[in-house]
Image (tube, rainbow, N blue to C red):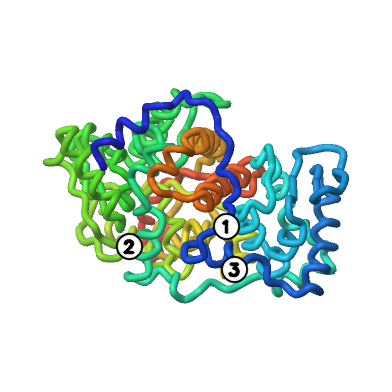
Amino acid sequence: MNTSVSDRTEAGAAAPAAAVATAPAQPDAAAWPDVARGPHASALRTAATRSIVQRALGALPLRVLYGDAPVTGVEGPLLRVHDPAAFFGRIGADGLIGFGESYMAGEWDADDLVGVLTVLASRLTSLVPRPLQWLRGVWARRRPGAQRNTLDGARQNIHRHYDLSNDLFSLFLDRSMTYSSAVFRKRPAEWDALPDAQHRKIDRLLDLAGVGEGTRLLEIGTGWGELALRAAARGARVVSVTLSQEQRDLAVERIARAGHADRVSVELCDYRQVTGVYDAVVSVEMIEAVGAEYWPVYFEALARLVAPGGRIALQAITMPDARMRATRSTYTWIHKYIFPGGIVPSVEAVERCAAAAGLRVRENDGYGGHYAETLRLWRERFTARSAEVAALGFDPVFRRMWEFYLAYSEAGFRAGYLDVRQLLLTPAAPTKDGERR
């Protein structure tokens, strides 16, 4: 399988956009039990949800078509609700999880899915009138204990996403097999600019960490090995750790093929179990998988592993601190279907946890608009290659789920609800009185 991955990332790059996966005639109940069973809210709750949701959507720059009724609204992208009873029933039972499952079931669609989701993301905190916001507790679920990022739990959470299939990821990632935000020279970006933009992102991080000839570099979160390859090409000696067997297998193969096996070691290892001391530590969009409960442990590990005078470069997706605090215990559609156990931190949370571990944030650069463009390119390529995704064995529900995930994420960055930051951390220097600053 792995020998086909690099070929897949280039073939068909200019293929025309295709329609999203058609609605499943009947979702597989074994694979998708909550999608297959349909809405399960009471008639009273469904009616109340209908009233609240219609009122909320009516106040937005959206046009909405409920079944055969006339279109409501006069401007904005069009949201088509094919089955209003099921749509309101799912939201009434499960809130935003139900909203996503309704899309997976084909009960609603949009010609401009990102446009619809961007409008919603831009007004996420005000969709429900303030006097009714106490109802959020009716829908919001707490995260299941099984998704806690214990040593065993973290392996299972990573396995559920990153071990889906290397061939699946190769269908929508570029030839660098880099699954994080690129940095473009200009926007909007085109597909053929993506590999260079990914290398630009990696090189900025390596520069931030001061990686060069002879640097002892620790990478936490291997991906498919591109950062380790570029660090080795600079003359660094790299230890890279991951919990994904699929990613490790391909990374090892790519590193050997590039002639850097003597400089790079890729290990199946949790960051909490890493030993040694390194001149530099780099971690790209891995903190989102750590879980708020373990952020102090993560930063303590960084502080323990970096040498005095060393540098730590992180790339992290972030959200506003108030929103993070309000939702940090909530179980969402993303947790259920895409990233179990994850939580996006705020910059303030990073600063608080870093300071407690004796680290200081020295540089902090954001470029959320670049992530929106990265996600657009991935989403367009994913939909254009839908038939190839199906040939790998992924059914229509999965394909609609994945397209919704990519669009949902893109919308978050376009709305400014999400950002992505590159941060430099260093050990705080001790003062005469023993404090660090």
Residue in view at x 52 percent, y 45 percent: 420
User: How far is mark 2 from mark 3, CA to CA?
Assistant: 26 Å
Judged by depth in the image, the label closer to the viewer, 1 or 2, is 1
Q: For the residue marked with disc 1, what is the amino acid?
A: Gln
Residue in view at x 44 percent, y 23 percent: 192
Q: Is residue 291 left or right of residue 124?
A: left
Quadrant of the image occupied by residue 301:
bottom left
| Of 316 and 177, the residue lying toward us | 177
Can the viewer see residue 322 in this picture? no
Q: Residues within 10 Å of mark 3 (few under 14, many from 20)?
A: some
Q: For the residue marked with disc 3, what is the amino acid?
A: Thr
Query: What percent of the width, then of the height, locates residue 236?
Result: 21, 39
Name the residue tied to disc 3: 330
Residue in view at x 21 percent, y 61 percent: 275
Quadrant of the image occupied by residue 322:
bottom right
Mark number, residue 26: 1
Mark number, residue 301: 2
Judged by depth in the image, the label closer to the viewer, 3 or 1, is 1
